[in-house]
C-alpha cells in the first residue's frame, strides 16, 4: 500500500495536497491578525464567563477565514483608528463560525458569518443588532460596528465617547 505513494502521480498528488493544506493553514492563521482577540473560545458560554472575569463588556466575533465578508470586516476594523479605541473598553473574543448552535441570540437561528455579539459585564448576551433586519448580527464594516458598540455602552450606562 505504501509503495503507491512512491509512484510519480501519487507523489505529485500528495505534494499538492500538503502544499494546499499548508497554504490554508498560513492563510487562516493570519486572517485575524491585528484584531485584539483575547482568546479563541469554544462557546458563547465560555466567552461570557471570560467577559465576566474581565469586568468589561464583551465583543464576540464569529468568523471563518474562507468568508469574504469576514475578511472585509476584519480589514475595515483593523484600518479604523476610531474602532481600535473600543478594544480598550471591550474584551474581544473569537468563536469559530462552525463551532456550535449556542452561537445564537436566544430565539434566533443564525448560520451566516460574520456575526458579532455583545455581552454585558456579567457575560450575558445583549440585544444589539446591525442595520439589516434579516441578518441582525451582521456588521459589514467598522463604522456600523462602532455605532452598535456605542449603543451597547450606552445601554450599559457607560460613556460611548472614547
Image (cartoon, rainbow, N blue to C red):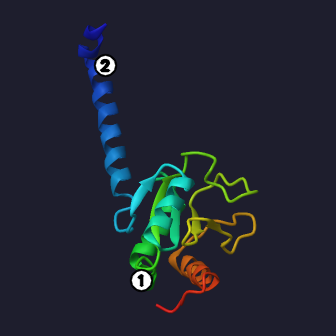
In the picture provided, is 88 more to the left or to the right than 14?
Answer: right
Q: Which residue is depicted at the point 51% across and 62% down?
A: 61
What mark, if any, has residue 63 been given in the picture?
Answer: none
Q: How many marks?
A: 2
The spot of residue 36 in percent (x, y) is: 37, 68
| Residue sticking out furthest to the bottom | 161
Mark on residue 10? 2
Percent position of residue 38, x then y: 39, 63
Q: What is the residue that sits farthest to the left in this orientation?
A: 6
Q: Is residue 57 at least partly visible in the picture?
A: yes
Q: Residue at x 68, y 75 (%)?
A: 131
160 or 31, which lies in front?
160
The image quadrant where one finds the N terminus is: top left
Q: Is residue 71 visible?
A: no
Question: Image point 51% across, 92% down: which residue?
Answer: 161
Give whichever of 55, 128 is nearer the camera. Answer: 55
Indicate the secondary structure of the residue bearing disc 1. helix
For marks 2 and 1, the one nearer the N-term is 2
Amino acid at each position: 500500500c505504501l509503495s503507491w505513494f512512491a509512484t510519480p502521480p501519487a507523489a505529485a498528488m500528495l505534494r499538492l495536497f500538503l502544499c494546499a493544506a499548508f497554504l490554508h493553514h498560513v492563510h487562516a492563521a493570519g486572517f485575524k491578525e491585528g484584531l485584539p482577540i483575547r482568546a479563541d473560545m469554544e462557546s458563547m458560554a465560555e466567552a461570557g464567563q471570560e467577559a465576566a472575569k474581565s469586568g468589561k463588556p464583551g465583543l464576540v466575533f464569529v468568523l471563518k477565514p474562507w468568508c469574504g465578508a469576514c475578511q472585509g470586516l476584519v480589514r475595515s476594523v483593523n484600518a479604523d483608528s476610531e474602532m481600535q479605541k473600543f478594544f480598550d473598553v471591550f474584551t474581544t473574543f473569537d468563536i469559530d463560525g462552525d463551532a456550535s448552535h449556542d452561537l445564537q441570540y436566544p430565539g434566533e437561528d443564525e448560520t451566516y458569518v460574520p456575526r458579532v455579539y455583545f455581552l454585558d459585564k456579567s457575560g450575558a448576551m445583549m440585544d444589539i443588532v446591525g442595520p439589516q433586519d434579516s441578518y441582525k448580527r451582521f456588521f459589514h464594516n467598522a463604522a456600523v460596528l462602532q455605532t452598535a458598540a456605542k449603543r451597547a455602552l450606552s445601554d450599559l450606562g457607560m460613556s460611548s465617547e472614547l
